[in-house]
Structures are given as structure tokens and as C-alpha cells.
Amino acid sequence: MFEINDLFDTFLFRATTVTGFLFYWLPIICILSPTYLSPFTFVDSTQEFKAYRMVQYDLYGQAYGSRQAFVSSEVRLWSHANLNRKAALIRLEKLTIERFRSLVSKGINGLFVVIPSTTTQWSDEQKSEICDLETILLAESVPIPIYFLPENQQMNDLYKSIESRRDSTKDSALAVIYDMITADGYQLSVNTGKYNQRTDSVLYNIVGKLVGHGIEERLPKILFVTHYDAMGLASGLAQGADSNASGVLILLKLIRLFSKLYAKQTTRAKYNLHFLFAAGGKLNYQGSKKWIDDYHDQKQQQQLPNDVDVVVCLDSLGQSNELYMHVSKPPKDTQTGGILRELLTQLSEKSTHGPLTFEQIHKKILKTSDFVAWEHEKYSWAKLPAFTFSHLNSSKSCSHSSISDVYGEVDLASIERNYQYISDALIRLIFNKTDVSFPIIDQNYLLSDQQSDYDQVTFTKQWLTFLTNYSRTPSLLTKTHPVVLALEQYAHRYLSNVVKTTIRPNKKDPEFVFFDGDDDQGRQLYVYRIKPAIFDLVLAIFIAIYLGLVYLVAAHWSTIISVLLRYRSYTNMFLSPASSQYGAYKRKIN
């Protein structure tokens, strides 16, 4: 006879029945579908990226850069129709200044820009694109947080996932609702709030000297200057390989060269040579301003006249076979600057150290503005004869302050060639050997004792790699920064009277202000895969219906069984021999 438990087990637990699907397959499908049935399964539900925030600082009371940092919002592609109170994601090649202003006007609460990796050389098109942005954005205050994301495979996958999400706002209402229910969304979160003003906004100059032959106080002085900081849209990505790691490299080589010459009385010239690693070059040359103020204060106290024959500034010397001498007032032929100009003209015409085009560029100082274009203009303003050597013919060149100025942009041969020409002319100047027909000195001999293990090219590579391994945004160059420590140590090795001067802004009217939170490691960006709110509503309705069906089946189980038993066909199926294997207890039906 047929047993009631056979009927219960067969009806409830056979997967081929309606209740089997209701109790088993449907819950399993619901559990697995968010993970395995998603159309974008190659993107993890939670990811982490390095994000570099746009630079932020104040200069002469004017705010520059992004004024916000906190972002926790759903992200959409820049082309989406509805971006109000959403974060926008865009590739660098898609971002123009007009599009940027359009996105801000649409009410976005954050912008994430995917840029090429800083470990590879940028194409000319990419450099042009970032140049257009930096020219405008570095000159104004931005009300929203902006982060830059270096490109990698993980970032490309995320971008494609967001890009593949269909914008159905122009479709029918039913299509819009369907898209809102089924589509995946992504939320970006950077857990940093608004940065506060730093109380220790300081910069550091490093200065040393080599004393010439004779009475030090009576000897003329030549000052060599280069700023060692860099600037770009993102504070953590400013490598400044050409501007101005190349200038720092040439000054390092000049220090080592002249320290060897000045080590012996017979090769010590009648010039005092001073060397300045200036801070804040990208902040209107705050380091040079500090040196000038201290110099004038000292001369006024001692009631002595100016003893600076010329100030030689080095800026962006890592590219091209062109060398420009920027001056605010062309020096006379008999002045030190004029003699150097003539020497370089003759050496370049003879191609003594390789092909080089040398030219002087004259640009007057705009006294109506507090800002200067080149570092020598600070000294010219203070009535000190000065000029700047650079391969750039204009300070407005994009590479002068750009995150695209990476290691691959520098030509080591150009650095070496510029160093050879500049050092040759300087040695002829200080030793008064102006006849370029004869070689003045064997530089290989000069460097042989100090370069027994590596040649000059290796020296340049090592220092350039070191300098570009760190972001050198002014706010990051604290007294414990590796670059600051390395330059100070190098100066102590070759120079005398080395001093690290602290530059502090005025408390009442600060020249510059930095903010907390900047570093060269970037911020941690968390990406979460989410469903829209309407999906939770639909899911809740579905669960309620499902639980209601289960409750109805359980509450009216006896009624369902009695109805089913009225039909012979069902009774024959339940009384078949195959059904006996599901029974656990025996109970006869009368």
C-alpha cells in the first residue's frame, strides 16, 4: 500500500516537480547570480587603486589647485546624461578644458582622470593634452576634488566595465526601469576629508662655496643657482626630469669639477664660487628671493658694495641641441656675462663638444607683476647681473611644469653636451683663457681620481634615477626628504661653509601656504561594485512573494494533497514501485 511519507518526500524533494524548483533551484539561482551571472564577472566586487590628488597650495594669498579631497559617490562615464551628484571618470585624451568646465556645470562631485603610466615615455599627443589642462588648471582654484589614476591592466578593465554600461535615459520608460534594475554600478571612495592648512609650511635652501686664490673678502663672486623642486597637476606625480632635475645634475657636476680644481693652489682661480640649491622655484623662486634678502642684509650691515660678478641660473637642460641664454638686460662685451656669451658663441660655432645652436634671448622684466618668468629675473630685479641657461626658448613651455616630464623625456647626451659647453666656457672665464683655438683643460684627468668606478654617464644616470624616483612638489620637500638630505650630503662632501637655510612664510601675510595630506605615495582609492536602490526594492518584493508562496503551500498542505489524490493519474504515479525508495516510514492509506 502507498504510504503518506512517500507522497510527501516525492512531491517535496524531487527536483523535477514545481515545489522542488520553488524550494531548491530558485534560491540557488538567486544566491549564485550576483557572483556568476553578472555580465562583468572579470571585475572584483571590491578593488583598490592608487589615486593622486590634484595639487593644492596658496601663493601670495591666491588659492591654487583643488580645494576638496573627500569623495564617496557612484561613478559614471563622463558621457553619461545624468551626472548630477555623481563622480565622473574620463581618459586624458577625452578631457579638454571646455569639457572639464561642462562637467563641473553638470554638478559632478568629483573627477577621476586616467592618465598614462609615469614609468613610460608619453607621446607628443598625450603631452599636448596634459599641457592644455595644466596651463589653465594650475593657474586657478578648482572647487571639486580631482584625482589622477595611472593606467594599468586593472584600471583598463574597470574603465571598460563602466563604459559598457548602457545609458538608457533616451530609451523607453520600460527600458530605463529594466536598466536600473539589472545594471551594475560602481562607487568610488577616497577616505580623506578637507585638507587643513599646515603650520610648518617651510622650504630649505642649501648653499656652499669654494674660496678662490687670494683674500676672500676682496675676490669677486660667481653664484651658480638651480632650483630642485618640480610642479605638475598632481602633487605625487611631479618628477620634473627635465625641469629641473637636469639643472640639478649639471650643478652637481660643476661642483665636483671645481672642487677638484680648487683643491690645489696652482689651479685655484681668483674667484669665489658659490653654489645654491634653491627651494620653491615653482613658487615664484622663493629660494632665490631668500638668498637675495640675506645677501643684501649682510652687505648693509657690513656697509660693503655688491661683489657678485654674475649669477648663472640653470634650468631645463636635458633635451635638444639648442642652448639659450635668457637675460633681462644684455650684458656688455666687457662684463662677465658678455664674456661668457662670446665664449659660448665661439665654442658652439666650432662644435667643440658636438653640434649646438647657441643664442641669447632678451626679455624685459614686467615690474607691474610680482611673478617672474625666469629665475635670473629675481636677481636682475635686485640689480645683480644674472642670466639663465636653458634649452627652452620660453618659460611658458608646457614641460616647465608638467607631470608628463618623466625620466624618459630626458636625453642623457644633451645633459652631457650642455655640461661640457658650460663648464668649458666657465673655466676659460675664471682663468682668463679666452682663446678657444686651444683646449683649456683635460676634464677626464680632472675627474679620474673621483670617478674610478664609473664614468660621467653612469653618474648622470644614477642621479637622474634618484631624483625622478621621488615627487618633488615644494610641499613634499621637508628637511627629511631623501632629495634634500642627499643634496645636503653632497654639498658637505665637496664644498665648504655649507648651510641649510630655512624659508618660512610671513605669519601675517604668508607668501606661500601648504596643506596637510600631500605625499608621493598617492591616496588609497576603493572601488565597490553596487546595485541601484531600486534593485533592493525589487529584490525585497521578490523575496516577499517567495516567502508568501512557501507559507501558503505549508498552511494548506493537506488540502493540496487531497485535491491531488482525486486524480487517478497522480495516484498511479505515487503508487509506482519507484516511489518506495523515498519513504522512511510506513503508513497505510485507507
Image (tube, rainbow, N blue to C red):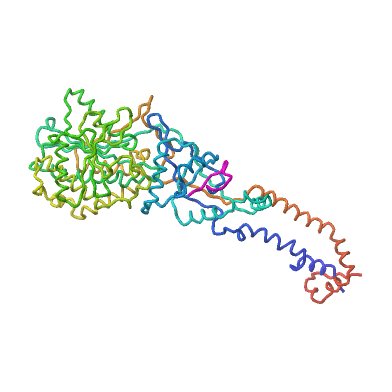
Relative to 147, 396 lies left or right:
left
Would you identify the image quadrant in which residue 398 lies?
Answer: top left
Relative to 531, 313 lies left or right:
left
Q: Position of residue 384 (x, y in %)?
A: 21, 30
Find the magenta span and give its range.
Answer: 78-90
Measuring 35% from the left and 46% from the top, which residue is drawn there? Answer: 239
Q: What is the chief secondary structure element of the magenta stretch? A: loop
Q: Position of residue 479 (x, y in %)?
A: 33, 38
Residue 126 against residue 326 in the figure, above or below: below
Q: Nearer the viewer, residue 480 or 131?
A: 131
Q: Quadrant of the N terminus?
A: bottom right
Q: Position of residue 295 (x, y in %)?
A: 22, 29
Q: Is residue 51 magenta?
A: no
Would you identify the image quadrant in which residue 382 lies?
Answer: top left
Relative to 45, 410 lies left or right:
left
Q: Residue furthest bottom?
A: 577
Q: Nearer the viewer, residue 418 or 197?
A: 418
